[in-house]
Amino acid sequence: MKLSRWFARLVIVSLATLMPCGCSEEPYGAPQVMSFKDGKRAAFSMHFDDSMESQVENALPLLNARGFVGTFFVNPGSERYGRYRQVWEVECIAHGHELADHTMIHGDVLSYAQADHEIGECARIIRGVYDGAPRLLPYITPGGVRWDVSDAQLRELLDKHELFLAERSHGCCPSSHFADITIPVLDAINRGAWTQLGFHGIGGEWLSTDVADLVGLLDYLDANRNVVWIATTSDAYKYQQEREAVRVVSLADATDAGFSVEIACDESRVNTFGRPFADLYDQPLTLRVSVPAHWTSYVVTQQTTVDRYGMIEENGRKLAQFDVRPNVGPADVRVAED
Ligand SMILES: [Zn+2]
């Protein structure tokens, strides 16, 4: 071997030992945090605003039939919400959709105190719909109303009520342009990113999107579901925040039968609203680890969660891909007996 090549190899080996996550213990590879859940290449979220009846009547059945989830920015004090309260508060949640804060009544807000009530009361009601426990909620300010609240005041209220401002990368309300409606998804796939698209009416009411166009989007998502994570806004947000805050992934106690693995996030990199990190950031991150060729399935245990997984293969390597929550201690990964 030429000396230069030998030296190059030495440098590579040294670098591998120095990498913060290069914590492979034979016979396992170094754990890799995937960009998105289940190793998907991109993520996409659908927003539905204003608790509109056409969303209940036309959008929800289409989403549910495909097992897709959306984020519904509701106004719990509005008549519209009241007419379908049971759907928002029971059926939506049962199907895995998310309720998010869009103020109580979507009306004019003329003072800080009124904004505090409109935003805070909406958040309180939504958390009550779940279980009243701490929960990070997305928020979007209503449009088309008078809004006498400064950006600084809004930031203070979001902090007070433990909300984050939801981004909407591709705006709102696509209408009658099927060729356009898939662009946000294509953009996510091309960039390996998380994108979002908003809707108001679906086949009725205002700023409406045709039902056929929504069907076109959902069919496109269906055809790409192996590469796109269709996520609620808070799940994708938490995943992204946690992933960017990962400090170290440590693999330990390695034997032929398994290992333990732990993800530690830097709490100072996210807004914890003064709470312990794991109170609000409870979205598991997907890890990938190369394992011995004899593995066919395995069980992952973390706290009270027990999940069984099959293998994936990439370039002839056997890989375990599984979910682990950060900052709640190690997960035990054990090859299955049968
Ligand atoms: Zn609105």
Image: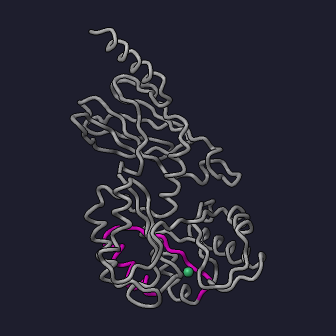
Name the side, left or right, on which 126 lies relative to 257.
Answer: right
Quadrant of the drawing holding the C terminus = top left
Name the side, left or right, on which 43 lies relative to 280.
Answer: left
Write the residue at 52% across / 61% down: 234
Which sits in the foreground, 208 or 326?
208
Write the residue at 45% across / 32% down: 260
Colour mapping used in the image: one colour
**Quarter assignment of residue 111:** bottom right
x then y, percent, for residue 282? 54, 52
The magenta span reads 53-78
68 inside magenta stretch:
yes
Name the side, left or right, on which 65 lies relative to 51.
Answer: left
155 inside magenta stretch:
no
Which sits in the foreground, 122 or 218?
218
**Quarter assignment of residue 191:** bottom left
- Residue 183 lies, with reference to residue 15, above or below; the image says below
x then y, percent, for residue 60? 39, 78
Quadrant of the drawing holding the N terminus = top left
Write the residue at 26% across / 33% down: 295
Q: How many marks?
A: 0
- Residue 111 lies, with reference to residue 243, above or below; the image says below
x then y, percent, for residue 290? 32, 33
Residue that lies at the very extreme toward the left in this rendered image: 316
Displayed-image quarter of ligand 1: bottom right
- Residue 91 lies, with reference to residue 261, above or below; the image says below
Write the residue at 47% across / 76% down: 172
